[in-house]
Image: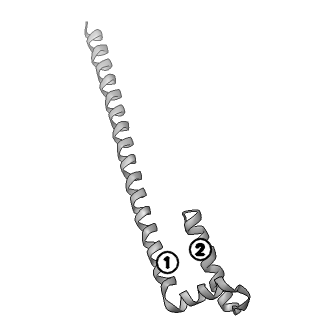
Amino acid sequence: MSLDLAVFWGNLAAIFGAISIFTTLIFVVIELRKNFEQFRLIREIHLHDVQNQYYLFWSQPKNAELVLKGSKNFNELTDEEKFSFENYVEFRIRFFHLGSI
């Protein structure tokens, strides 16, 4: 009878162990979802910040003048201006079309 009692307690301990592992896995999944949601929100805030900085930078008179000049006639730009204008266009395409930096 002592052996049957030991088997019973062993089986009961195995059941509690399985339940605790299952509960831990559920907790880990919930925490991962929370972390992914926080990451998504932080990424969105960062993208809005970068977009705001982008608008502020290219709204400065000197930069706005370059964009307008390059939009009208790219060939009239100096090499330095072409480089800046090409960076402007490349960044704009990557940021607004692809949604990434």
Near-viewer residue (84 or 73): 73
Q: At 53% across and 92% down in the image, what residue appears?
A: 62
Q: Is residue 73 left or right of residue 1?
A: right
Q: Is residue 77 left or right of residue 10?
A: right
Quadrant assignment, res 1: top left
Quadrant assignment, res 72: bottom right
Q: Sequence-wise, which precedes: disc 2 or disc 1?
A: 1
Q: At 36% across and 37% down in the image, what residue appears?
A: 26
| Colouring scheme applied when the structure was drawn | one colour
The residue where tag 1 is placed is 54
- Residue 34 image point, x, y percent: 36, 49
Near-viewer residue (68 or 29): 68
Q: At 38% across and 37% down in the image, what residue appears?
A: 25
Residue 43 versus residue 81 in the image, above or below: above
The residue where tag 2 is placed is 91
> Dot 2, how many residues are within 10 Å of its Cα: few (below 14), some (14-19), or many (20+)?
some
- Residue 59 image point, x, y percent: 49, 84
